[in-house]
Every structure is written in structure tokens, then in C-alpha cells.
Image (cartoon, rainbow, N blue to C red):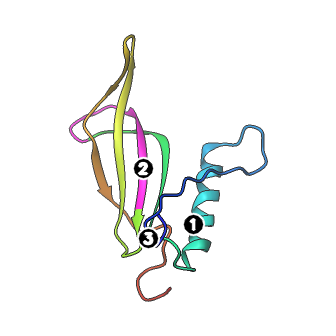
């Protein structure tokens, strides 16, 4: 989200035909880190597929992870676990975990 509140969608392309997911996540993270120093963003996020053990469970599950961060320094990873079924995708309970900022510099260093 820009500093004026506009939503902007971005993607990553490192030039490889079939890049690994981590390479694209790293590319987006590095790009966001460079751009955040100009203070043109209010919030940033990256969504990607992961395998996690949801709270109260003992086995890994597929999930969508949204790594979200606000210029204030608040950072969360939000997880939406899911399973594939014959009748479509079944979503489980959403949960979040606080994490260290990845995109914006710590307060006072921008």
C-alpha cells in the first residue's frame, strides 16, 4: 500500500524460466527493503505457499502465508491452512504469528 493508500500489485521475475519460490521471495524482500527507504509505502506484504504445523495440530499442512508489515514496525505472518478435497479446497482456521520486520528499517533508522 502506498503512502497515499493506493494498493499496488507486484510480482517478481529473476529471469529464470522456472525459478524457485525462495529466490522470488528473496527478490521481492530485497526490492521492498530498497524501496521502503524512500517512504513511499505505508504497508508491504508477500503471499506464498508454505507447509506449517497449525496450532493444536501435530502434522504439517499446506497453507498460504501472507507476510505483512506496516511502516510503524508491526510485522505479522498470517497463515491460512488448507487441504485439497474432491469437492474443492477446504480452508482451516486462520492464525497469525508476530515476526521481526523484514521490509522496513527499524524505527528511527529510515
Instruction: Give the labeled residue for mark 1.
Output: 32
Closer mark to the observer between disc 1 and disc 3: 3
Q: Residues within 10 Å of mark 3 (few under 14, many from 20)?
A: some
Count of labels shown? 3
Q: Earlier in the sequence, mark 1 or mark 2?
A: 1
Instruction: Write the residue at 25% across / 34% down.
Output: 57
Q: Nearer the viewer, mark 2 or mark 3?
A: 3
Determine whether, in the image, residue 109 is placed left or right of residue 87. right
Looking at the image, which is closer to me, 15 or 56?
Answer: 15
Q: Earlier in the sequence, mark 1 or mark 3?
A: 1
The residue that mark 2 highlights is 66
Q: Are marks 2 and 3 in contact (CB under 8 Å)?
A: no
Task: Please tell me whether residue 42 is drawn above or below residue 80 in the rendered image.
Answer: below
Alpha carbon distance from label 2 to label 3: 16 Å
Q: Is residue 82 above or below residue 6?
A: above
- What's the residue at 46%, 73% (across, down)? 3
Instruction: Return the residue at label 3.
Output: 42
Q: Which element carries disc 2, helix, strand or loop?
A: strand
What is the residue that sits farthest to the bottom in this orientation? 108
Q: What stretch of residues is rendered in magenta?
A: 55-68
**Identity of the residue drawn at 34% across and 69% down:** 74
Amino acid at each position: 500500500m502506498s503512502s497515499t493508500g493506493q494498493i499496488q500489485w507486484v510480482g517478481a521475475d529473476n529471469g529464470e524460466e522456472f525459478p524457485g519460490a525462495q529466490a522470488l521471495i528473496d527478490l521481492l524482500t530485497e526490492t521492498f527493503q530498497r524501496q521502503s527507504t524512500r517512504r513511499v509505502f505505508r504497508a508491504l506484504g508477500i503471499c506464498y505457499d508454505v507447509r506449517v504445523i497449525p496450532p493444536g495440530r501435530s502434522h504439517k499442512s499446506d497453507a498460504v502465508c501472507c507476510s505483512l508489515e506496516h511502516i510503524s514496525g508491526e510485522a505479522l505472518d498470517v497463515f491460512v491452512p488448507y487441504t485439497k478435497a474432491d469437492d474443492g479446497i477446504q480452508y482451516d482456521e486462520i492464525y497469525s504469528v508476530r515476526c521481526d520486520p523484514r521490509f522496513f528499517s527499524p524505527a528511527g533508522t529510515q
